């Protein structure tokens, strides 16, 4: 286990994108495919158009060792209580199983509670069984069904 006191979690900035993309390049994450840096920078700038969508990084000794995105979404249902969506959770492979993921998830849950969310949702690729077991250990439960419709990618 690493010393979790040496891990800090903060909102990402543009300078963090190369480190985040390096984490996304893991074969287990997005089959090793990542955006070119100029495209990632363009999309990152677009995040600011969302009322409460933040890319976070976990850092240790100035090195990015994990990342996730958190969207707080307002709702008309549930008496107006917001909900949270956690996406793109990734940890440096050398540090998986050492508490970084747990620190990330604890941070995300705390942010959702601070925002008075009534629930947190996340999805995970069906093949990422280790990740599923990790989320279940943290108290997440498999719920309902997840459906997707893959749309043909149109070049921008």
Image (cartoon, rainbow, N blue to C red):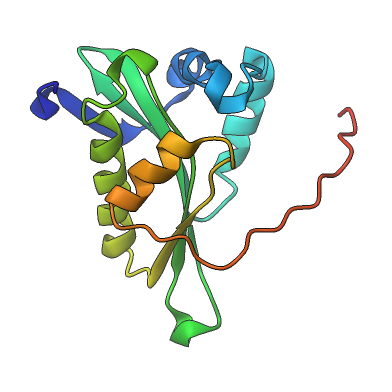
Which of 76 and 46 lies nearest the eye of the viewer? 76
Question: Measuring 57% from the left and 51% from the top, which residue is drawn there?
Answer: 50
Left/right placement of residue 106 relative to residue 140 reads left
Question: Measuring 67% from the left and 14% from the top, which residue is drawn there?
Answer: 36
Q: Is residue 151 visible?
A: yes
Which of 76 and 1 lies nearest the eye of the viewer? 1
Left/right placement of residue 34 relative to residue 2 reads right
In the picture, residue 41 is in which quadrant? top right
Q: Is residue 92 placed above or below 46 in the rendered structure?
A: above
At which x and y percent is residue 146? 64, 59
Q: Is residue 119 placed above or below 22 in the rendered structure?
A: below
Left/right placement of residue 42 relative to residue 155 reads left
At which x and y percent is residue 52? 47, 54
Which of 97 and 5 lies nearest the eye of the viewer? 97
At which x and y percent is residue 133? 38, 44
Question: Measuring 34% from the left and 18% from the top, which residue is drawn there?
Answer: 64
Total numbered badges shown on the rendered structure: 0
Q: Quadrant of the C terminus?
A: top right
Q: Quadrant of the N terminus?
A: top left
In the picture, residue 105 is in which quadrant? top left
Q: Is residue 149 placed above or below 29 in the rendered structure?
A: below
Left/right placement of residue 131 relative to residue 152 reads left
Q: Is residue 55 visible?
A: no
């Amino acid at each position: 286990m690493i010393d979790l006191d040496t891990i800090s979690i903060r909102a990402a900035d543009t300078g963090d994108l190369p480190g985040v993309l390096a984490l996304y390049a893991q074969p287990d994450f997005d089959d090793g495919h990542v955006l070119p840096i100029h495209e990632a920078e363009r999309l990152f700038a677009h995040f600011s158009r969302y009322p409460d969508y933040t890319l976070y990084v976990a850092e240790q000794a100035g090195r990015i060792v994990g990342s996730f995105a958190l969207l707080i979404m307002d709702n008309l249902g549930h008496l107006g209580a917001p909900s949270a969506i956690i996406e793109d959770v990734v940890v440096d492979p050398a540090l998986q199983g050492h508490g970084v993921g747990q620190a990330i998830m604890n941070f995300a849950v705390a942010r959702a509670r601070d925002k008075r969310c009534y629930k947190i949702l996340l999805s995970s690729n069906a093949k990422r069984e280790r990740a599923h077991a990790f989320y279940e250990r943290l108290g997440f439960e498999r719920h309902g069904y997840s459906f997707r419709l893959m749309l043909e990618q149109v070049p921008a």
